[in-house]
Image: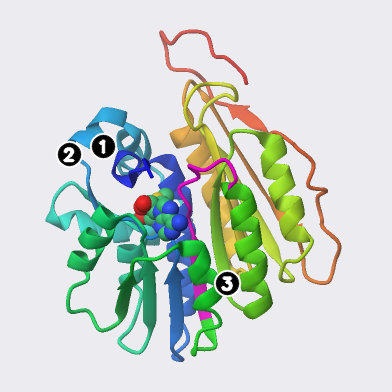
Amino acid sequence: MNYRHAYHAGAFADVLKHAVLVHVLDHMARKATPFFVLDSHAGAGRYDLAGPEARRTGEAEAGIMRLLAASNVPEALVPYLDAVRRFQNAGPVYPGSPKLARMRLRARDRMVAIELLDEDKVALSRAFAGDPVVDIRRMDGFAALKSLLPPAARRGLVLVDPAFEATDEFERLAGALKAAWRRWPTGTYIVWYPIKDEAEVAAFHAALLAAGPPKILRAELRVQPAGRPGLGACGVLVANPPFTLEAMLAEALPYLARVLGREGVGGFRLDWLRAEGTEPVSAPAARRIPESSRPRPRGARARTRG
Ligand SMILES: C[S@@+](CC[C@H](N)C(=O)[O-])C[C@H]1O[C@@H](n2cnc3c(N)ncnc32)[C@H](O)[C@@H]1O
C-alpha cells in the first residue's frame, strides 16, 4: 500500500465527495431517530495543509483553498464550507471524511470507521480517542461492507472511498457493493471513483446496474482537459440519495467546474444511472464528461480542449 491521502487531502476530489457527504448527513440528522455511518476507507481523519505532503502536490491549494477564497458561493456549498472553516479554527488543517461525519452525529448515532494502513489507523484512533459514538477498526474496508451490514439502526449511510491502487479495485468495489446492497438495500451509499479511463468506469457502472438498489444518482466533475497527467476527473455515485441531493448538485457542480477548472476548462455531469422503477436512464456507455470553457484570464496561454 503506497497511497497516502495526506498528499491529496482537500483536492477537488475531496471537495466533491465531502460536499455530498455533508449534505446527505444534514438530511439524515433532520430526523430524531438514530442513524448509522460506516466509513469503509476512512484515512487519518485530519490533514495538515501546511505540511510537506500537501505542499508538494499543491492539490489542496487548487481545491479547497481556492474554493474558500472564491466569491458568490452557491447556497448548496455553504454547509460544507462552514464545516471546513470551523475545523480550520485550529489552523491550516483539513477534515477527513470521519471528522466531517462526526460533526453531524448526535450522541444517539453511531459510526464505524475502517482504515487498513497502520499509520493512518493510529492517527484516526488518536483523533477519536474517548469518543463513545465512534468505533475505529483496522480491517479490509471491502470485507467490512459484508460483515458490518445491515446495522442495528434502520437508517444510515455508507461511504466507500477506496485508494484505487490495485488494478482490480473497480471489480473488488463492484463485488463488495453488490454484496452490501443485498444485505442492506435501503441504506444510502456514497461511492467515490476516479475517472482515468472512461471505458473502465462504464464497465463499473454496468456491473452495479446489474444488481443495485432502486435509485443511483451520478455526479462527475472534471477540472482539467482529458488526457493530461494526474487525476483530472472523478465521480460520486449515490445510491438511495435524499430527495434534496439532485437539486443541491445541480447548483454546486457548475460552480465547482468553473471555480476549480484549470486552464479555463471544467466540466460536470449529473444524471440518474437508474431512477426508481425504471431501466437505466443513461446507457452506461463510455462517455466523456462535457467540458465547458470560461474566458481565459488576460495574458494566459491558449486554452486546450480535451
Ligand atoms: C481516499 S483515502 C480515504 C480518504 C477519506 N475517506 C476522506 O475522505 O477523508 C483511502 C484510504 O483507504 C485506505 N485503504 C487502502 N486499502 C484499504 C482497504 N482494503 N481497506 C480499508 N482501507 C484501505 C488507505 O490507506 C487510505 O487511507
Magenta residue check for 35: no
Residue 176 percent coordinates (x, y): 60, 63
Report whether residue 78 is seen: no
Picture disc at residue 54:
1
The reply to whether the C-beta atoms of the residues labelled 1 and 2 are less than 8 Å apart is yes
Closest to the observer: 83 or 113?
Answer: 113
Spatial distance from mark 2 to mark 3, Cα to Cα? 34 Å
User: Which label belongs to residue 188?
Assistant: 3
Prevalent SS, magenta region: loop
Q: Position of residue 305 (x, y in %)?
A: 61, 18
Q: CA distance from mark 1 to mark 2?
A: 6 Å
Compute the Cα span from label 3 to label 1: 31 Å
Q: Which three-letter amino acid code belongs to the residue tagged 2?
A: Gly
Q: Counting other residues with Cα less than 10 Å from the Cα at mark 3, is it few (<14), some (14-19), or many (20 or more)?
A: many
Residue marked by disc 2: 51
> Which type of secondary structure does the marked residue at label 2 adopt?
loop
| Horizontal side, residue 194 vs residue 34: left or right | right
The figure's colour scheme reads rainbow
For numbered disc 3, what is the local secondary structure?
A: strand
Q: Amino acid at mark 1?
A: Ala
Task: Report the image quarter containing ligand 1.
Answer: bottom left
Label 2: how many Cα within 10 Å (few below 14, some 14–19, many 20+): few
Earlier sequence position, callout 3 versus callout 1: 1
Residue 91 in sight from this viewpoint: yes
Mark 1: secondary structure: helix
Location of the N terminus by quadrant is top left
Asked which quadrant contains residue 51, the reply is top left
> Could you tell whether 306 is left or right of 158 in the image?
right
- Give the magenta range: 156-168
Is 158 contained in the magenta span?
yes
Residue 183, relative to residue 270: is it above or below?
below
